[in-house]
Image: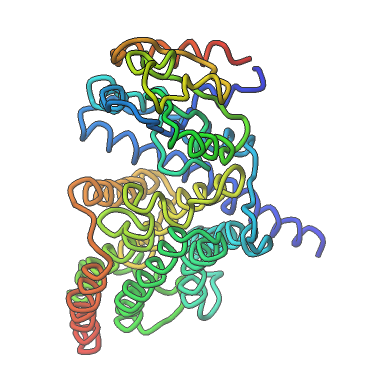
Amino acid sequence: MGKFWALKKSIWVFHMCTGSCNNCDIEILDCLTPKFDLERFGILLVGSIRHADVILVTGAVTRKCLPRMKLTWEQMPQPKLVVGIGSCALSTGIFSPGYNIVGPVDKHIPVHAYVPGCPPKPEAIIDGVVKLVGSLG
Amino acid sequence: MMSQVLYSMGAFVVFPGFLFTAAVGLLVAWVDRKITARLQWRVGPPWYQNFVDFFKLLGKETIIPRGVSRISFLASPLIGLIGVTLVSLILWQTNLNPHQSFLGDLIVVLYLSILPSLAIVMGGSASGNPLGALGASREMKMILADELPFIVAIFTPVVSIGSIKLGSILIHQSINGMMFTHHISSIIALVVAFFCIQAKMTLVPFDAPEAEQEIMAGPYIEYSGPPLAIFKLTRAMALFTLPVFLITMFLGGFQFGGLGILWSVVKYVVILILIILVKNTNPRLRIDQALKFFWLRMFPLSIIGFILALVGL
């Protein structure tokens, strides 16, 4: 049993949108529906960042969202993990020429898993979470 | 003398106190999650899920926000935990040996059962978060709403039997059968007390104090790590302890001989499943609606039950 044996089986996620087009957010919520049901792996969506273990970031980071994203990340209790979801969070995607885009996410906070796609399918998000869990000690 | 002290410590820490109540409570909280999941056509978590959640939260960092009263912020989860542990201890000791209860233990249990709610109020107010303060004020209103009908309902069988000792109530029921088989007043009191424990555990439809979707878990919002784990544990233990209180008062308590154990478990499971079904089939009430429900519907109903008990029905 490694250091993170309990964390691996009980991941509470906090959902943060940094200016996405809302498509990735809908796919994240899709993971929690009866068809995919992430609660069977102990994954829960929580309302407060203080309860969270993993923060799911969607969207290319806009200038206005950047301080809020950093503040949210700082408010999270250790051990904390970040998953970037969607092409925008990974590389700012189609919004890269935008005047108010300061992303991608990993330029500002450390990202532990990347889930590409525009939007990624729920299967891809589950795969990303499984790989994140596998990378823990 | 020494062995008696050791025995009392063992009773408090291991059985039937903290460890026993905590283990069964976390298991029961899993039953709640699993049945909820099945009702929503999901698979639901494995049986050890709540234990894992608890140990994970113990390993997380405890953040104390700036400008917070450290003592009341960190002490309030412990106060709630001690309250629910003592309630469980007294109830189980009485059930194990009805002849050994002391005079007025019912009043002690009633007082101690408010402690978890008061701890939530204290923690929420201490956390210095506007949403936490909002949740704390709602929790306070919820205590005001459910406490009045709950106490009247609990005292209805006391009036019928004429004794305020939990032990005498249990002995009376073991001779004459469950309260509601020979007292109409106790049926009414049982219904009222059932809704009151739903509110005491702040489960839907009375979960306005910690509405996750609108005020983000309310009083718990600033808690992280071990204090949050203790709060979750207190809730799970309450889900085990409060139905046991109802069973002790109205449904004949727990028997420990032969098939009696099975029958006792059946009684508990029926109450638990009723709680979960009410939780899953109702929308959340606003705090004013909850107050109206308890003061205008449940309180007159419990008074009717009380008067029937005074008449002798």
Task: Please tell me which residue lies in front, B193 or B106.
Answer: B193
In the rendered view, tell whether residue A84 sits above or below residue B37: above
Q: Can residue B177 be seen in this view?
A: no
Task: Please tell me which residue lies in front, B90 or B213.
Answer: B213
Residue B110, percent across and down? 45, 73
Q: Which colour scheme is used?
A: rainbow
Question: Quick check: B246 left or right of A129?
Answer: left
- The residue positioned farthest toward the bottom in the image shown: B311
Which residue shows up at 50% across the image and 80% down it? Answer: B104
- The residue positioned farthest toward the right in the image shown: B2
Q: Can residue B53 be seen in this view?
A: yes
> Can you tell which quarter of the image residue A60 is in?
top left
Residue B129, percent across and down? 50, 58
Which residue shows up at 45% across the image and 44% down it? Answer: A48
> Can you tell which quarter of the image residue B180 is in?
bottom left
Instruction: State which quarter of the image contains the N terminus of chain B.
Output: bottom right
Task: Please tell me which residue lies in front, A82 or B85.
Answer: A82
Which residue shows up at 61% across the image and 44% down it? Answer: B226
Residue B251, percent across and down? 31, 61
Task: Please tell me which residue lies in front, B33 or B25.
Answer: B33
